């Protein structure tokens, strides 16, 4: 994993989301709003002041988000949320305009994808990576057949928060560029069992799909013991397990092709 955090950027065009799934129970957006004492309900989705961040420029006219960044998109909501339907077309336009960036969003609403894409989507935008999030077998069996049927250039499966054992075998083929697995964080987190993670890893290896163990979660079961893992160690402890398979240097699938030379991005079309 790259230690160079300068290659990443965050873009949250809207904030707030409605819970739709067991994985949403202890949603980090709600937890963070509570922690910061927000007066506005977390379920109320609203545009942020950074709505048009990708096309904002500095005083010297250069882009605020420099060329070549991987942009984590809409991480304080869900990019396919219905409440944001009127705003999303402008976001697609910005993504189209900034072909020099990679936009990476996760969604629990992949069933809305076809209602949300722009007319010129075609086989997908080269610079958009979509992570379909699942948390248990039921949600995997609902979302992944839909996800597999969609035209998207870069697809990843995000198993998080992993709250039960899941068999992904039926959904793994070379259209999936990476599977990334993590436990739940927060004081009420449901425990994640290391055996579940190892089983997903085996499923990925047997289909030759890159696998990433990105975080342990707050309560982690290993060899029959439940460990409480402090937030600041949840990423590093997962990394220490050293069980990733065919993972590249950056927090995107290895198949997303780009080169870094003196912080400048090449290989753009
Ligand atoms: S979809 Fe994501 S952001 Fe929305 S409530 Fe669920 S966990 Fe939170």
Image (cartoon, rainbow, N blue to C red):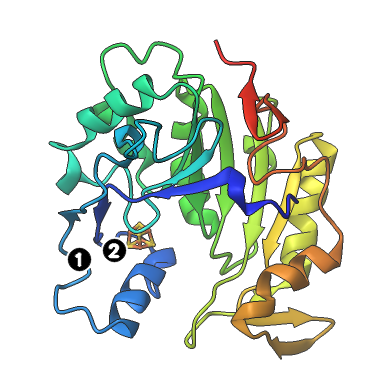
Q: Nearer the viewer, residue 44 or 188?
A: 44
**Above or below 184: residue 153:** above
Q: Sort mark 1 into few (<14), some (14-19) or many (20+) by Cα contacts within 10 Å.
A: some
Residue 67 x %, y %: 51, 30
State which quarter of the image contains the C terminus. top right
Residue 41 x %, y %: 16, 73
From the image, tell me which residue sits under label 2: 19
Q: Residue at 38%, 39% (x, y): give it.
A: 110
Q: Residue at 49%, 81% (x, y): give it.
A: 186
Q: Residue at 84%, 68% (x, y): give it.
A: 240
Disc 2 under 8 Å from ligand 1? The reply is yes
Q: Which mark is residue 43?
A: 1
**Above or below 124: residue 197:** below
**Above or below 82: residue 231:** below
Whether residues under marks 1 and 2 lie with C-beta atoms below 8 angstroms apart, the answer is yes
Q: Residue at 53%, 60% (x, y): give it.
A: 136
Q: Which mark is residue 6?
A: none
Disc 1 under 8 Å from ligand 1? The reply is no
**Above or below 157: residue 215:** below
Q: Earlier in the sequence, mark 1 or mark 2?
A: 2
Q: Sort mark 2 into few (<14), some (14-19) or many (20+) by Cα contacts within 10 Å.
A: some
């Amino acid at each position: 994993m790259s230690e160079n955090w300068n290659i990443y950027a965050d873009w949250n065009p809207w904030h707030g989301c409605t819970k739709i799934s067991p994985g949403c129970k202890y949603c980090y957006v709600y937890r963070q709003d509570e922690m910061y004492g927000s007066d506005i309900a977390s379920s109320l989705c609203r545009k942020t002041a950074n709505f048009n961040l990708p096309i904002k420029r500095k005083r010297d006219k250069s882009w605020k988000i420099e060329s070549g960044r991987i942009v984590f998109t809409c991480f304080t909501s869900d990019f396919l949320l219905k409440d944001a339907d009127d705003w999303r077309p402008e976001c697609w336009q910005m993504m189209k305009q900034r072909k020099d960036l990679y936009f990476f969003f996760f969604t629990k609403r992949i069933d809305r994808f076809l209602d949300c894409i722009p007319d010129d989507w075609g086989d997908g935008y080269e610079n958009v990576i979509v992570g379909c999030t699942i948390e248990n077998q039921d949600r995997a069996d609902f979302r992944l057949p839909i996800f597999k049927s969609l035209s998207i250039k870069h697809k990843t499966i995000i198993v998080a928060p992993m709250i039960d054992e899941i068999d992904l075998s039926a959904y793994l083929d070379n259209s999936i560029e990476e599977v990334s697995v993590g436990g739940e964080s927060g004081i009420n987190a449901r425990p994640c069992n290391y055996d579940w993670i190892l089983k997903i890893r085996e499923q990925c290896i047997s289909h030759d799909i890159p696998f990433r163990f990105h975080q342990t979660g707050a309560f982690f079961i290993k060899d029959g013991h439940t460990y409480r893992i402090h937030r600041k160690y949840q990423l590093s402890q997962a990394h220490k397990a050293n069980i990733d398979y065919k993972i590249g240097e950056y927090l995107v699938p290895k198949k997303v092709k780009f080169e870094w030379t003196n912080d400048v991005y090449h290989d753009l079309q």
